[in-house]
Every structure is written in C-alpha cells, then in structure tokens.
Amino acid sequence: MSAQNLGLGGRAAPKARTETTRGRGLDTGASRPTRPAWLPRPTRPPGLRSADELRALAEAGNAALGSLTDHEASAADVVAWVAANFATDAAAVACSMADAALPHLVAQQLPGVDVLFLDTGYHFAETHVTRDEVARALDVRVVDVLPEQTVAEQDAEFGAELFARDPGLCCARRKVEPLQRALAGYEVWFTGVRREEAPTRALTPLVTYDERNGLVKVNPVAAWTFDDLLDYASTNAVPVNLLMSHGYPSIGCEPCTKPVAAGEDPRSGRWAGLAKTECGLHL
C-alpha cells in the first residue's frame, strides 16, 4: 500500500519522527546488564496527576461515554474525550503494526501523539515495513520500545527459543515489562483491543484505570468488528500490514503467529496449539 495518500486532508506527509527507548530513555547502543523480568515500577514523573485523580477521571469518562450501553460513544467521540482531558504529550498509542487505524484515528485529534511499538526482536519483516510507513506518513512520533535484553542475550541466559518452552515468560520479558516502563511517563494510553476478538475481551470498557501500569487506559475501537477495522483502513487509506491479506487477522511475533483459516477465531493463530491466548498486556 502506498504511504503517500493516507487521509491527511491533502497535507504532505510529515517527516518521519522516531525514537528508540527503554522506558523513556534514549537507546545509546551501550551494552545492557541482565535484569529480572519484573522490575519495580519507576517513580512517577513529576507533573503527572495522581493515581486517585486519574482513577476518578477514568470512571467518570467511562460513564459519560456510555460504555457497554445501547448509547455507547463512537470511537471518534472517545478520542475527543481524551483530547479534552489530556495533553498530547501525556498520551500514548500502543500499536502492534498490524494496521495503522488506531494511530490515524487518534492523530486526527491529538496530532504528534507518541505511538509505542514493542520491538520484541521477533517481528515479521512486514511488521517493520508497516512501522516505517506509519512513522513516515502519519502525524505521530513512533517510539520503539525495546526489552532489556537482545534476543541473543536472552538466549544466553535462558536457552534458545524461550518462546517455545515458556511463552508466558518470553512475553513478560519482551512485551509486558518494556511497555510498563515506557508507560511510566504518560497519563493515558490507547489500545486497539476489540470485544469480538476473544471471550477474554468481550466486556472491554471504553475507559478504565489501568492499575498495573498506573494510568488511564482507553479502548476507543472496542465495539468495532474486524470488518469495521478494514473499512476504516480502506476509507482513510492508512497503512495495513501485508500479512493481513494473507490469512493473518491478528499479528504478533513471527515464531508464535500462524495464518488463520476463513471463519476461524481471528486470534487462533496466536500461540497455536498452546493454552495461551493473551500476551499479558491486557490482563
């Protein structure tokens, strides 16, 4: 898909802005010591509202937006609520780079927003291509969030292919803990979780307080179907991972993602053959 026409109202595509980070610090390329997967959460940066303030705001917002009711707010209205209550630099969008619908949706009302890409070291080449298109074509800043260890360092400590022997630990080290560190500098984060994706997501609220990560969590496309997602991407000509058109409706790390047959659960290709259904980011 071309990155030159992405629904930006006729404006030239913004210059790519990217940052590589472990937490909120720039990656200098220096060697990294081995650390436990679960580190204490970093001290809350000054200037952010308290947990009690954010918790109350999330509760009020979820009610005002009619979450899980027959008068539930649209995805655009949910983003508008965030834009009215949070500064752009206090917000982040988590994106797996399966598609750029969510970053595009948010950037319409929060231009320049940070988009967090969990660069696990195991992604498909097509996912990196999509990430680069998003950075080049949308009015966002892509932030590459890295694990504490490279794949080689993890292999040296735990043995090769940890994902095959203990996928929960692998996800914890390469996704959950890095995201937790990255989110420490924000007050609100957006996710692309949709209720139809899995039974574990069926009651996803529009807005909630994320107790584990200590900030507001917003799920503006919770009510969308997979077709809604594709329609938005097509209408707005946003980048879509090439794998989406080759049987991959849900895309994670390459070793743990398989194509899905028509009519099957969209997430059945994730950790196929295992009891695992979630990486842990949304539990």
Image (cartoon, rainbow, N blue to C red):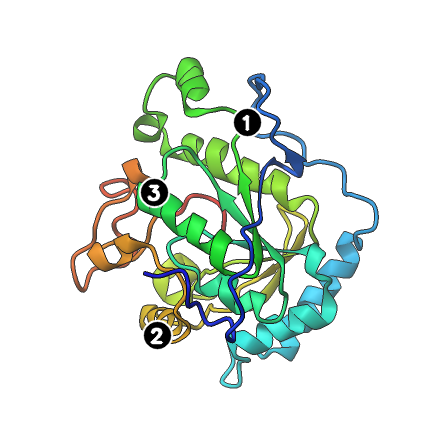
3 vs 1, front mark: 1
Disc 1 secondary structure class: loop
Q: Earlier in the sequence, mark 1 or mark 2?
A: 1
Nearer to the camera, 105 or 225: 105
Disc number for residue 67: none
Which element type, helix, strand or loop, lies under badge 3? loop
Nearer to me, 90 or 4: 4
Residue 201 location, x and y as percent?
A: 43, 60
**Left or right position of 23 against 7:** right
- The image quadrant of residue 31 is top right
Compute the Cα span from label 2 to label 3: 30 Å
Give left or right: position of 148 versus 226: right
Residue 120: in sight, yes or no?
yes
Residue appearing at x 22%, y 41% in the figure: 273
Q: Is residue 70 above or below residue 107?
A: below
Label 1 and label 2: CA atoms lie apart by 37 Å
Instruction: Tell me: residue 226, above or below residue 134.
Output: below
Q: Which mark is residue 276?
A: 3
Quick one: label 3 or label 1, which is nearer the N terminus?
A: 1
Q: Residues within 10 Å of mark 1 (few under 14, many from 20)?
A: many
In this view, the mark in front (1 or 2): 2
In percent of width and height, residue 109 lies at 62, 71
Q: Which residue is mark 2?
A: 231
**Badge number at residue 148:** 1
Q: Residue at x 57, y 24 (%)?
A: 29
Please say whether residue 205 is visible from this viewpoint: no
The residue type indicated by label 3 comes to: Lys
Q: Residues within 10 Å of mark 2 (few under 14, many from 20)?
A: few
Left or right relative to 230: residue 104? right
Which residue type carries mark 1?
A: Glu
